[in-house]
Image: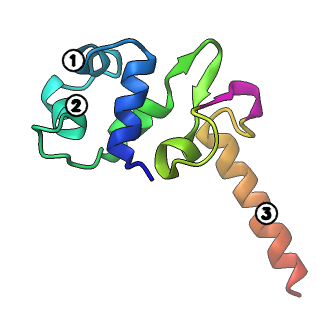
Amino acid sequence: MSTINQRIAVLIKDFRDSESGFAKRIEVSSSVMFNIVNPKGRKSYPSGPVLEKILDLQKEGKRVSAEWLMRGDGEMYQSAESSKFTNPEEALEYLRKEFIRLRQGDK
C-alpha cells in the first residue's frame, strides 16, 4: 500500500516535473514539496491548501482523483464530467436540499 506522499511523487513523475517544477505548477514553495515527497525531507503530510491545488490539476481533460490521492483507490485521474459538482456552491446546495429532504422524511 502506498502513502499519500508516494502518490504525490507518482503524480509529479506523471506530469514529467521535478519537485520544484511541480511546486511551481501548484504555486507552493519548493521546500514544501521537498518535505512532502523527498526521502531526505520530513515526509510531512500535505496541508489542505496543497491538496486543493493538487486536486485542481488536470491532464488531458481529466482531474486528479481525490479517491486515488487520499486513499490510493481507483484511477489516478477521473474525467472532469464524472464529477457531480463543478464548484463548492453546487455541493453546498445539494447538501442543503438533501438535509431538507431527510428532515421531512423524519416527520
Disc 2 secondary structure class: helix
- What amino acid type should be assigned to the residue bearing mark 2? Met
* Image depth: mark 3 or mark 1 in front: 1
What is the spatial separation of the Cα atoms under label 2 and label 3, in whole angstroms? 38 Å
At which x and y percent is residue 88?
59, 41
Q: Earlier in the sequence, mark 2 or mark 3?
A: 2
Residue at image location 79% in from the left, 59% down from the top: 97
**Residue stretch in magenta:** 77-82
The quadrant of the image that shows the C terminus is bottom right
Q: Which residue is mark 3?
A: 98
Q: Earlier in the sequence, mark 2 or mark 1?
A: 1
Please count the marks in the image.
3
- Residue at the front extreme? 1
- Using a 10 Å C-alpha cutoff, classify the residue at mark 1 as few (fewer than 14 neighbours), some (14 to 19) or many (20 or more): some
Report if the CB atoms under discs 2 and 1 are less than 8 Å apart: yes
Q: Which residue is mark 1?
A: 20
Residue at image location 35% in from the left, 22% down from the top: 26
Residue 81 covered by magenta stretch: yes
- Using a 10 Å C-alpha cutoff, classify the residue at mark 3 as few (fewer than 14 neighbours), some (14 to 19) or many (20 or more): few
Residue at image location 34% in from the left, 31% down from the top: 9
What is the spatial separation of the Cα atoms under label 2 and label 1, in whole angstroms? 7 Å
